[in-house]
């Protein structure tokens, strides 16, 4: 089991790349593509081979309008995948879940990081569980639930409000026994946000570093890209926009980029880094 998480905290010129493995029939971009454990295991190992530093495994879709699934179904989807990948790789695995029961079993099966889109608000014992596990936790902002979050998102000042929410969740986690160095934050692009909200959060991304935790950015293939260029219903047509957001994030404080397209993102980051290094001569 990997227990050295220093890679998450080292100052790096290039963000870590987190590849996405959705073991779901209904995720917005690749739902159903890796629904079998064997397919998901193969895909996860391929993402590591392509240059991913972390893979994020999820068994419940959190796309807009998604319905909740049972605890048993979610466990049955993700545990075989985590176990299968862990047998063949020592690289970092993240479990993408709101449920503390799933997170606990996933960590016991070999996962290293808990990525919670509810920022530990889904269940009353979430903070207690992550404190006892003593693993890195991603706290993400979302307005509403996946089922209703895009019905009518509204903010007076989206960046200020998201910063305030994440600051409060950091404080609650620490009071509950979570070590500060285990906390990662995510502004939640696309989770209860309008196009303008998403663009404001991206433009203000550097402000999130002031919270003192590594920043994860997840903008890959999200619908706001399609609203800009007209590819609204074609997630695979949003790779260019995904790379633009990733490079902007890399230049403005993102420590981790959560992406579908690992090869393209790794290449873009390498080229961007080489240009920046040359410009410093």
Image: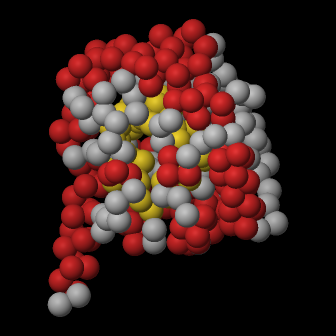
Which quadrant of the view contains residue 86?
top left
Q: What residue sits 72% from the left and 36% below the top?
A: 121
The C terminus is located in which quarter?
bottom left
Left/right of residue 223 with respect to residue 192 in the rendered view: left
Residue 94: where, in percent of width, then height? Answer: 42, 35
Q: Is residue 30 visible?
A: no
Q: Is residue 184 above or below residue 251?
A: above
Q: How many marks?
A: 0
Q: What residue sits 30% from the left and 55% below the top?
A: 265
Residue 103: where, in percent of width, then height? Answer: 53, 25
Q: What residue sits 32% from the left and 42% below the top?
A: 4
Which quadrant of the view contains residue 38?
top left
Q: Is residue 157 above or below residue 29?
A: below
Which quadrant of the view contains residue 249?
bottom left
Left/right of residue 281 with respect to residue 124 in the rendered view: left
Q: What residue sits 66% from the left and 35% below the top?
A: 127
Colour pattern of the rendering: secondary structure
Q: Residue furthest bottom?
A: 281
Residue 71: where, in percent of width, then height? Answer: 61, 14
Q: Is residue 125 visible?
A: yes
The N terminus is located in which quarter?
top left
Q: Nearer the viewer, residue 273 or 194?
A: 273
Q: Nearer the viewer, residue 70 or 176?
A: 176
Q: Nearer the viewer, residue 175 or 194?
A: 175
């Amino acid at each position: 089991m990997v227990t050295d998480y220093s890679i998450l905290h080292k100052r790096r010129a290039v963000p870590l790349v987190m590849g996405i493995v959705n073991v779901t029939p209904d995720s917005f971009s690749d739902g159903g593509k890796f629904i079998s454990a064997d397919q998901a295991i193969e895909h996860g190992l391929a993402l590591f081979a392509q240059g991913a530093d972390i893979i994020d495994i999820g068994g419940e879709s959190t796309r807009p309008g998604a319905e909740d699934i049972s605890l048993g179904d979610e466990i049955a989807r993700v545990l075989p995948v985590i176990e299968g990948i862990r047998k063949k790789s020592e690289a970092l695995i993240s479990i993408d879940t709101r449920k503390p029961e799933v997170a606990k079993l996933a960590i016991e099966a070999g996962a290293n990081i808990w990525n919670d889109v509810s920022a530990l608000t889904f269940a009353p014992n979430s903070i207690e569980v992550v404190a006892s596990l003593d693993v890195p936790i991603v706290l993400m902002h979302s307005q509403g639930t996946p089922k209703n979050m895009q019905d009518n998102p509204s903010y007076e000042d989206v960046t200020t409000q998201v910063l305030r929410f994440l600051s409060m969740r950091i404080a609650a986690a620490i009071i509950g026994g979570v070590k500060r160095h285990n906390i990662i934050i995510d502004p939640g692009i696309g989770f209860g946000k309008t196009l303008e909200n998403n663009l404001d959060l991206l433009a203000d991304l550097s402000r999130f570093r002031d919270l003192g935790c590594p920043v994860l950015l997840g903008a890959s293939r999200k619908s706001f890209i399609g609203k800009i260029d007209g590819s609204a219903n074609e997630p695979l047509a949003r790779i260019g926009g995904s790379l633009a957001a990733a490079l902007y994030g890399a230049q403005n404080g993102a420590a981790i980029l959560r992406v579908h397209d690992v090869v393209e993102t790794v290449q873009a980051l390498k080229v961007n880094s080489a240009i920046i290094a040359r410009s410093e001569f």
